Image (cartoon, grey):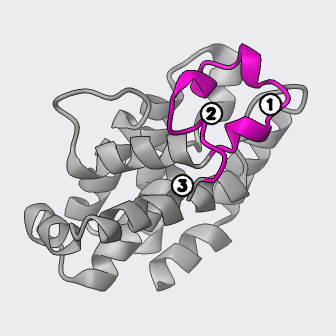
């Protein structure tokens, strides 16, 4: 997954992750660090594989094959929260802001315009579930929720995500 390695090695990506950590340093709730992003990427891909949806996704999204599909899913997972720091600092929607930030990273990593459109739409959509969500947006939203070990969190009683039955489970993906 060369394009994923390119994202992970991009100093701008590292800067966004560091901004997230600095902005949330005093927050008791979930962190939006690299580990969370990797977890979301992996879980989104697992969800697609478990439901045997990979071939559908490739065809529906017009992707070149399994490797491209895997990289698209992983890129969406890795980049889905890169704008979170801006939400902490200025109250902007981190999903919409992150989708804009992701474009340059994806271009530098070698993703084509179709792939960038799919990834940035999923990032934009991941925050709120809706009937009109894209295939990847829905998987990303669910993976984001499943990535949290809420049952072990000290702040769970004050957290809006803990009320979600999937995140409240003891053993997650």
Q: Which mark is residue 84?
A: 2
Q: What residue is rendered at 55% in x and 18% in y?
A: 92
| Mark 1 residue element | helix
Q: Please, is residue 95 above or below residue 77 in the view?
A: above
What residue sits right under mark 1 in the picture? 23
Quarter of the figure with residue 110: bottom left
Farthest-out residue, front: 170
| Mark 3 residue element | helix
Of 64 and 38, the residue lying toward us: 38
Does residue 105 appear in the picture of this structure?
no
Query: Residue 170: image x %, image y %?
Result: 66, 46
Q: Are marks 1 and 2 in contact (CB under 8 Å)?
A: yes
Q: What residue is rendered at 23% in x and 72% in y?
A: 54
Task: Give whichever of discs 1 and 3 has the lower sequence position.
Answer: 1
Does residue 161 appear in the picture of this structure?
yes
| Mark 2 residue element | helix
- Number of labels in the image equals 3
Q: Please, is residue 38 above or below residue 70 in the view?
A: above
Farthest-out residue, right: 26
Q: Which mark is residue 11?
A: none
Query: Residue 83: image x %, image y %?
Result: 58, 37
> Within the magenta stretch, is there residue 152?
yes
- Main secondary structure along the magenta-highlighted residues: loop
């Amino acid at each position: 997954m060369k394009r994923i390695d390119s994202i992970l090695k991009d100093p701008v990506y590292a800067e966004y992750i560091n901004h997230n950590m600095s902005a949330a340093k005093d927050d008791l709730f979930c962190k939006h660090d690299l580990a969370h992003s990797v977890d979301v990427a992996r879980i989104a891909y697992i969800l697609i594989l478990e439901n045997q949806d990979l071939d559908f996704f490739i065809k529906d999204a017009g992707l070149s094959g399994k490797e491209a599909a895997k990289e698209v899913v992983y890129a969406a997972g890795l980049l889905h929260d890169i704008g979170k720091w801006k939400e902490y600092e200025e109250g902007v929607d981190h999903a919409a802001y992150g989708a804009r930030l992701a474009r340059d990273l994806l271009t530098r990593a070698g993703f084509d315009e179709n792939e960038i459109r799919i990834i940035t739409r999923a990032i934009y959509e991941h925050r709120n579930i809706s009937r009109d969500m894209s295939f990847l947006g829905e998987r990303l939203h669910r993976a984001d929720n499943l990535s949290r070990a809420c049952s072990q969190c000290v702040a769970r009683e004050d957290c809006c995500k803990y009320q979600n039955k999937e995140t409240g489970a003891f053993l997650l993906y």
